[in-house]
Amino acid sequence: MKKAAKLGVASLFAIFIGLFAASTARAGIYINYFPEDITIQEGDPLDVPLFFECGACAGKPVEIFVWKQDRTSGITEYLSQNEWIQSEDSTEVPPFVSIGSMLEYANFVWRIFDDTTGMSSFDLGICIDATMSGWVTENADCAKRAVIIEEREDPPPPTCSGLTVNPVSISKTLTRGRTETVRVSVANSCGPVAEFNASTSLKGIILSKQSGIMDVELNTSSLMPGNYSGTINVSTGAASAQVNVSLTVQAPGFPIGGGSCTPSSLSLWPNPVALSAASGETATETVTVKN
């Protein structure tokens, strides 16, 4: 909202003293309803209901003055009359409000501020004057209330539940000595899980974690050919999930995925084999067969 020129604190207080002391000289203008201290949360708009009568206006316009006074510094400033008033029927009318000659009252909900972010508590003053002199006179009716702006509380964090992993199973066939890594996502009802626990008793499995992700390394270098199966247990708090692992390790030269292999030739190493042993002793030698 735009703000007009500042009004001296001493002048404003003098006006208030004169206005409130001379209640019989208000030219028939009476503020019937202006809320007591108003409490809102920071960032919310400030809407102020205002109901006043003007028994002596006879259909003439009245002038409305609005100002705010900082409760800490005491600095007072008028709010611009370029702002608007919203009536109960949502019709926008200017601050110079014409009071009907028959009804002679006005009932408004005034949007003073659209956004109170960064504002501290202040006093809000309103004066209604029918003299149309451009300033507050002794014939005006005035009211001042405290607007208490409370610090907005952060909403509580969402309650996250459950735990899911994707994929839920890993099935691989690898030649002994090969390594392969599978990435598994870890999430709950709120999204990726930043911190979680993961463990397994399955040999040849190396786990590494980062936010929402678990990398499962299948390392066959220390495994003999054969079938291996087990689970990876993932947990956070009371929630848990499992990844089922099935790993087939094949000897080098064995076709991946099974099937048969017809060798075109065979080789032995060492070749020839030379053994020697004393009487009563046993001699052994390891021979590697390849095709």
Image (cartoon, rainbow, N blue to C red):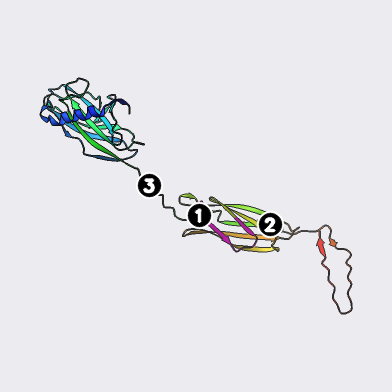
- Residue located at (23% from left, 39% from top): 37
Tell me the CA gap for discs 2 and 1.
27 Å
> First in sequence: mark 3 or mark 1?
3
Residue 174: assigned label: 2
> Is 244 above or below relative to 88?
below
The reply to whether residue 106 is in sight is no
Give the residue number, with chain letter if any, for mark 3.
155
Type of amino acid under label 1: Thr
Residue 215 on image: x %, y %:
60, 53
Residue 187: assigned label: none
- Residue located at (89% from left, 72% from top): 276
Give the left or right position of residue 2, taking residue 125 as reference.
right
Type of amino acid under label 3: Pro
Give the residue number, with chain letter if any, for mark 1.
164
Q: Which residues are magenta?
A: 194-207
Most foreground residue, 35 or 92 = 35
Give the left or right position of residue 167, taking residue 15 as reference.
right
